[in-house]
Image (cartoon, rainbow, N blue to C red):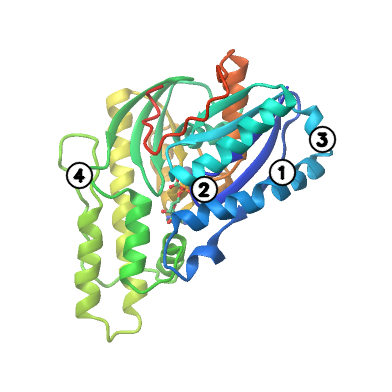
Amino acid sequence: MLVLGIETSCDETGVALYDKCEGLLAHTLHSQIPTHSKYGGVVPELASRDHIRFLIPILNETLKQANRQTKDLNAIAYTAGPGLIGALLTGATFAKSLSFALRIPSIAINHLEAHLLAAKLDCKNLDFPFLVLLVSGGHTQLIKAISLNNYEILGETVDDAAGEAFDKTAKLLGIKYPGGPLLAKLADNCDKSSLAPFPRPMLKSGNLDFSFSGLKTHALTVWQKNKHDENMRNQIAKSFQDAVVDTLTQKCKKALNITGFKKLVIAGGVGANLNLRNSLKNLMHDLHGEIFFPKIEFCTDNGAMVAYTGFLKLEQGLKDSNYQINVKARWPFNEN
Ligand code: KG4
Ligand code: ZN
C-alpha cells in the first residue's frame, strides 16, 4: 500500500510518500519563512496562497524522488485540523479532489496525533502504551497513549504553549521570526547565565498542567532593566530555556511516576530543542526507562508524519466515508 501524505495546517507545505513494505520513500517540505518574516509572524491568508502555489510542484517533486506516479497511489492522508482554517482547506481540497480523480480512499488526519506518532517512523520497535510529551507551537500536553485512536490527556498548558512561549519571548527580545529556534540558538551561545534563576511555573501545582505565559513576562522585565548590556539577550535566552526545559522534565518525571510507564516519546516542534532532548535523555537514563524522539526534521511540521499516521489508520480499515471537505480549526485529538 502506497500512501500520499499532505500537511498544510500552518506555514509549512509538506508532502510525503509512505509505502507499507519500503517505509518512507520520499518527503518534501516547502517552508514559508520568507513569506511571513517581514510581518513578524504567520499571515493566514498568505499561508493559504503559498500552499496553493506549492502543493502541485511539491507533489511532483516527491513522486519524482520516489520514482512513482500518481497512478501508483493507493490512498491519500491529509491534515484536517487543528490549524489555520484557510490553510487546512487548501490541503483537504487538494487531497479530496485527487482521491476523487484517482478513485482511491482519503483519510482525515489529526495533526496532533500525527506529531504523536512521528517517533514511530524511525523506531518501529516503539509499541503502545507510552507517555507522550507533545510540545508544539499551539500545544503542550502530557498524553497517555494507550493504543492507536486511544489517548488520554493527563495535563496541558493553562495558557501559552511551550513553543508559543519561545516565539513570544523571542519577539520581546527583538529576535526576528521564526523566533523559537533562534532563541534556542542564542541560549546555546551562553554556557551559564549569571541571572537569578527564572521561575519554574506550576511545579508545585499538584497536577500535570503547565503555564508558560508568566515566564515570558519575567523575561521582558529582566530585558527592560538590562537593555544596555549587549550580552543580556543570550543570558535571558539561556535562563528562559533552562526554566522551560527543567519544568518540562520535572512534569515528565511526575507523569512517569503516576502512570508507571517506562517509555517516553517526544513530539512536536519544541522536541527539536537539543537541551530538552538531552535533559529528557538523562531523566530516562536515571529512571532506567527508554526515550524515543522523532528525527529533528520530523519534530516540526512535515508530510511524513501525516502519510505514516494515515497508513496506520488505513491498515485498521479507517477512511473518509464521503467526499465532503471538513476541516477543524480546533480538534482535540482524542475526539473524533
Ligand atoms: O510542531 P510545530 O512545527 O508546529 C505546530 O504544530 O505548532 O512547532 C512549532 C513550534 C514553534 O513555536 C517553534 O518556535 C518551536 O516549535 N520550535 C522550537 C525549536 N524548533 C522549533 N522551540 C525551541 N527550540 C527549538 N529548537
Ligand atoms: Zn505541528
Please name the residue that numbered disc 1 is placed on: 59
Categorize mark 4 by other alpha carbons within 10 Å: few (<14), some (14-19), many (20+). Answer: some
Nearer to us: label 2 or label 1: 1
Q: Residue at x 61, y 41 (%)?
A: 303
Tell me the distance, in whole angstroms, between the alpha carbons under discs 2 and 4: 27 Å
Disc 4 marks a residue whose amino acid type is: Leu
Which x, y percent locates residue 72? 80, 28
N-term-proximal mark, 2 vs 3: 3
Disc 1 marks a residue whose amino acid type is: Leu
Please name the residue that numbered disc 3 is placed on: 69
Please name the residue that numbered disc 2 is placed on: 300
Residue 197 visible from this viewpoint: no
Please name the residue that numbered disc 4 is placed on: 203
- Element type at mark 3: loop
> Does 157 sit above or below residue 276?
above
Disc 3 marks a residue whose amino acid type is: Gln
Q: Residue at x 61, y 19 (%)?
A: 314
Q: Quadrant of residue 260?
A: top left
